[in-house]
Amino acid sequence: MNKFRIPLALAVPAAIGLTFLVLPLAGLLIRAPWSTLPERLTEPGILAALRLSLLTASLATVVCLILGVPLAWVLARAEFPGRRLVRALVTVPLVLPPVVGGVALLLVFGRRGLLGGWLDQTFGVSLPFTTAGVVVAEAFVAMPFLVIAVEGALRGADARYEEAAATLGATRWTAFRRVTLPLIAPGVAAGAVLCWARALGEFGATITFAGNFPGRTQTMPLAVYLALEQDVDAAIVLSLVLLAVSVGILAALRDKWVAA
């Protein structure tokens, strides 16, 4: 029997599924205003949204690296009561509706929130409806991608190298910095790229927690939402930029996925 022969009962729904996924992207490419694309890409509103998106997504990724890599190490290497619960809590933002995440952030970091009031009174810091608020919202929804990738890399790394470093007198921090981190560097890089891409495309938590103010909190997904009501061609151009970024992310991670 030819192993490449696909049963008709599987081929038909598979073809329909592929069409369902590809057709909207094809529609975006077909409807794109290619003749005016260069001019539209240089419009002030689009450039401002693009710059803000790149800035906030990059800052959110840095925050996730600083906090998420140690968190992933704790989940992968440390034994403590409730570790499964902690891991479940870390992954909650993956399945939590982004708008709900934005409401939760408001309840914590808003001026009347659990921490927001104290931050405002003590340091004069108010996060909602600011660029910093965009970074917080993006980091909240994107960090699980980094943690999961890094934890997987840590579990796949041979712990004997760390044990050997410890027998030679290295502290846990030194072993992590000089042995573990170089071993898991590809996993950290892949997690950071996924984290950055998720932050770049964040919409729900951002608009709920940070609002939609041009030049201050209006990222590209928010600009697409606003443009749909005013200028469809501008929305298509912004969508094409996000699509190009997504394809670039897939291309960058292809070798890692194929190896996996």
Image: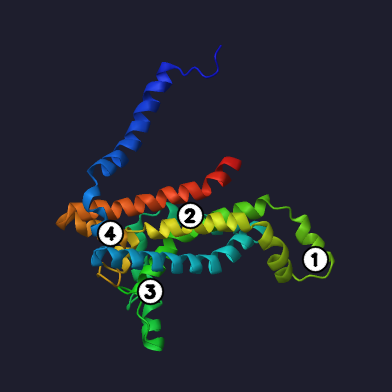
Q: Which comes before the other along the chain, label 2 or label 3?
A: 3
Residue 33 visible in the snapshot:
no
Q: Is 81 situated above or below 240? A: below
Q: Which mark is residue 41?
A: 4
Task: Identify the amino acid type marked 1.
Answer: Ala
Q: Which mark is residue 166?
A: 1
Task: Identify the amino acid type marked 3.
Answer: Ala
In the rendered image, residue 22, in percent from the top left (x then y), is placed at: 34, 37
Mark 1 and mark 2: Cα distance apart in space = 32 Å
Residues at badges 1 and 4 in contact (C-beta under 8 Å)?
A: no
- Depth check, mark 1 against mark 2: the one in front is 2
- Depth check, mark 2 against mark 4: the one in front is 4
In the rendered image, residue 42, in percent from the top left (x then y), is placed at: 27, 63
Task: Identify the amino acid type marked 2.
Answer: Leu
For this orientation, the residue located farthest to the right is: 168
Residue 211 visible in the snapshot:
yes
In the rendered image, residue 30, in percent from the top left (x then y), is placed at: 25, 41
Q: Secondary structure at mark 3?
A: helix
For disc 2, the marked residue is 194
Q: Nearer the viewer, residue 208 or 259?
A: 259
Residue name at image x 38 percent, y 74 percent: 132
Q: Is residue 170 left or right of residue 145?
A: right
Task: Identify the amino acid type marked 4.
Answer: Leu
In the rendered image, residue 151, in percent from the top left (x then y), is placed at: 60, 55
Mark 1 and mark 3: Cα distance apart in space = 40 Å
- Depth check, mark 4 against mark 3: the one in front is 4
Q: Which comes before the other along the chain, label 2 or label 4?
A: 4
- Depth check, mark 2 against mark 3: the one in front is 2
Mark 2 and mark 4: Cα distance apart in space = 25 Å
